[in-house]
Amino acid sequence: MTTETETETETDEVGATAVRVRLVTLRDGLGFRLSRVARGLRQGWAEDLHPIGTTPPQVAVLRGIAEEPGCSLRSLARVLGTDPTNTKRCVDELRQRGLLTSRDRTGDRRPLGLALTDAGDAFVRTVDQLVTAQEKRIADALGPAGCRGLAEALDQLERLLGLDGGAEDPDCDTQEEHDHHGGGATPTPWDARYTENDWPTEPDAALVERVEGLTPGTALDLGCGPGRNAVPLAVRGWRVTGVDASAVGLAQAHERARSAGVEIQTVQADLSDYLASAPPVDLVVLANIHVASEDRPSLLAAAARAVAPGGHLFVIGHHLDSLGRGGPPDPDRLYTEERLTDAFPGCTIEQMARRPRPHDGDGPPLVDLVVWAHREGRGA
């Protein structure tokens, strides 16, 4: 098994530093098999927890508090490597069930400390029994030698991917779509998600429909991840820059671009930081980016400002009607017509419409909200 990674940096004419990562994928489909095993273990763990009425994110919160009684919500989220909003949601649910409580920290002004109740202690012991049973099933299947070999291989893979600095549990963040408001060179929970999961390769159909009649020019894909929209745009002749906080996602985007015979430029950065000095482009894409409600107005306005005269803005995200079935579990992060109507200064909304799409599992279709806007001026 061999893996080779090369990183190149270059500066374009407007001074934006682009990071190009050449990734030679694992041979013999091992990367895919590792992703499939990881998904199977996660699904099995969720099924183990279902009979006792809990979920992997809730368990991560409970065990985190058990390890650090009296911790604050923010410090808990930091240790777990998760979004504080989603951590708070889990905390509120567990508090309602009587499994944890919060108390004042006497003598200082720090936030309330979180602690397990007696019922919470008992619940964690039950969870620990399930963990032991799961570990035993794996150990029995592999045997002592197999367990040692697997542990050594995982150590090597974690070092390769830069994940050996501490075990973050991305299960605690149940958002299915992007919150790329963090960024920089530090590994993020999204690095693990892009590594462990098979991300969609098909572009957003609504985007394909709207660019069909446009003359290709410059395009900016914000939160591009593995390039599901960036690469198809490049195939259609657009000169694409993809911006994302995750180096792993950008490496996958480059790999997909090479497979398609095209090139894309990528920048690893926080979206707001990048947009503060971004050159205007003919097409801006903001697909499935669900930031906190207090950050949404500034991000959407900055995306609109990045549209060149005569250019277009495409936005798609989960509508509030999808709450509980797709997208972030926090309703404030989801899209509604009211939240987006006046969100794009300088651009005219040509279409804003709900668009149903099939659910991956059973149940009614999910609902996306699609916005297509145009900035007046010369050009297309």
Image (cartoon, grey):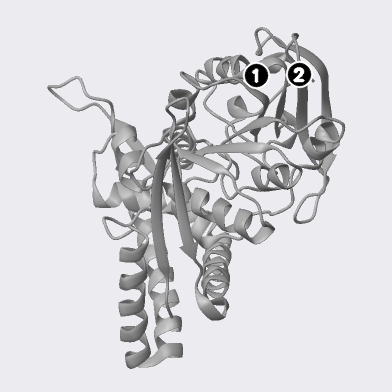
- On-image quarter of the N terminus: bottom left
Q: Nearer the viewer, residue 378 or 355?
A: 378
Distance CA(mark 2)–CA(mark 1): 10 Å
On screen, 244 above or below 7? above
Q: Give the quarter of the image for residue 210.
A: top right
Q: Which amino acid does label 2 sit on?
A: Ala
On screen, 329 above or below 8? above
Q: Where is residue 112 in the image (x, y as percent from the top left)?
A: 28, 28
On screen, 68 above or below 149? above
Q: Does dot 1 land on a helix, a strand or a loop?
A: strand
Q: Which of 358 and 282 is in front in this view?
A: 282
Callout in the foreground (2, 1) = 1
Q: Give the quarter of the image for residue 308.
A: top right
Q: In this view, does 47 lie to the left or right of 352?
A: left
Q: Nearer the viewer, residue 29 or 11?
A: 11
Q: Where is residue 316 in the image (x, y as percent from the top left)?
A: 71, 32
Visible residue check, residue 105: yes
Q: Which mark is residue 373?
A: 2
Is mark 2 in CB contact (under 8 Å) with mark 1? yes
Q: Is residue 337 left or right of residue 27?
A: right
Q: In this view, does 223 lie to the left or right of 135?
A: right
Counting every numbered tag in the picture gives: 2
Q: Name the residue under label 1.
A: 307
